Image: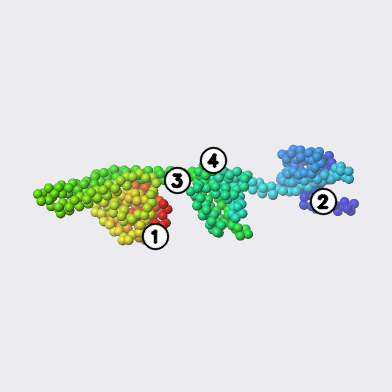
Amino acid sequence: QKSESKLRQVIDAIPALAWCNLPDGPNEFLNKGWHEYTGLSEAESHGWGWQAAFHPDDLPPLMEKWMKMLASGEPDEIEARLRRHDGVYRWFLIRAEPFRDESGKIVRWYGTSTDIDDRKRAEEELRRSEAFLAEAQRVSKTGSFITDLLLDEHNWSEELCRIFEFDPATRITTEEIRARFHPEDLPIYEDAFKRAVNGDRDIDLIYRIITPSGKMKYVHAVAHGMEEIAGRPLYIGAIQDVTESKIAEEALSRARAELAHMARVTTLSALTTSIAHEVNQPIAAAITSAGACLRWLNRDQPDVQRARETAMRIEEDGKRAAEIISHLRSFYKKDVTPRREMVSVNDLIGEMLVLLRSEADRHSVVMRTRLAADLPVVSGDRVQLQQVLMNLMLNGMESMSERGGELEISTRREREEVIVTVSDTGEGIPADKMEEIFKAFVTTKAEGTGMGLAISNTIIESHGGRLWATVNPQRGATFHFTLPIQSEAQIEY
């Protein structure tokens, strides 16, 4: 009796619901913890009464499993919800073991029910978090990874495998990742790998991959070195499929270039009369000089010296006409891909002065310059920068069309930038338009399209500079733009 009492005390003290069932299934004994938890008395729990404590949805699979155990005589376990005395259901892990006599016959079933509700909730929360993360990665087309570079171990998310078209069941290796790179972008991979091995903690790169299905994708990868394990760098990162945005960006760039080209054509169409006058001047001078040259040569005693001087003037006039036509041809040229080269801003301004001289005369505008000597060259697209200068200079002239004025173009260097200003003495810019003039379709001119300054702003920003306007103290407005100074070695051709 003392031994049974001690055993009963032990069974009642263990942190689980303990029980003993007869070989055919009904309950024989339940410990104190069971009764305190469920609120069921011994009489209510005895036999098959213990079933009342289980959740109605969990009881059928529980009984099915219990019947199979009774038939097989093998130990097993199942998870089910038990109702607490206050009506709250919590998850329990129920384990059962058969106890056999010397002949192997089952004489009792012993088991425990352990509260695992907190664990189940944590597991469910983890599953939900993983599901949300997987869905977020799928929607954003972003995959994640953890990589041990030196051991060549790569733990990739399902979405990242989908982007690269890897079978999630196969082992991913550095060589297989490298094989996905676009051949032209392999140097990007080699450089990033070298930097990571040498301890660079942060990697950020955009490159192209070619998948087994033949698709070319643009991806943006970022990685951060978390820690080192036995001297090996461990990186965590994310890779996003940016193909659609890259294609859209390229299409937008082409559309902007097309629009810029049309703006140039429209601008020059409006200048046809002035351009014709500008070209006709050297041609007419050349014709006059040619007639004089013939007269000097047709004399009874040809005046060779004067004929030579006249021929030289013909040559100069021809070069001047050719220079104007050359500038016009480059400006009309349709090229959707910007062509970067080393450009002298002062030379560009000189070209625009030649091209717009007749337009300035038509508006009674005097053009002046204050150009810094020894101004560094900049990296830029010559035609696009011509377009910006032409737009700003024409805007200034048109603002002075009623009574004329002065247009001053100046350049200077300030730290690592070239600053260009175009200042006029015209009507100025209304205060309520100062913040809006660089937006598309906003104009202060009756017949303006509102695209000139918007396109100019886009061009300058694409060159790494900025464009802004200020009101002059006395009269008119000044437009300023900057261009970063680059050495020829820094330019990517």
Q: Are marks 4 and 2 in contact (CB under 8 Å)?
A: no
Is label 4 or label 3 in front?
Answer: 4
Q: Are marks 1 and 3 in contact (CB under 8 Å)?
A: no
Name the residue beneath numbered marker 3.
249
**Amino acid beneath label 2:** Ile
Name the residue beneath numbered marker 1.
416
Alpha carbons under labels 1 and 3: distance apart: 29 Å
Secondary structure type for disc 4: loop
Q: Are marks 2 and 1 in contact (CB under 8 Å)?
A: no
Q: Residue at x 25, y 54 (%)?
A: 367
State the image coordinates of residue 111 (x, y, percent, origin top left). 80, 46
Taking the view exactly as shown, the residue that stands out farthest to the front is: 301
**Amino acid beneath label 3:** Glu
Alpha carbons under labels 4 and 3: distance apart: 24 Å
Is label 2 or label 1 in front?
Answer: 1
Label located before the other in sequence (1 or 4): 4
Res 100 seen here = yes
Secondary structure type for disc 2: helix
Name the residue beneath numbered marker 4.
213
Label located before the other in sequence (4 or 3): 4
Q: Closer to the camera, 217 or 432?
A: 217
Alpha carbons under labels 3 and 2: distance apart: 72 Å
Q: Residue at x 15, y 49 (%)?
A: 293
Alpha carbons under labels 2 and 1: distance apart: 83 Å
Label located before the other in sequence (3 or 2): 2
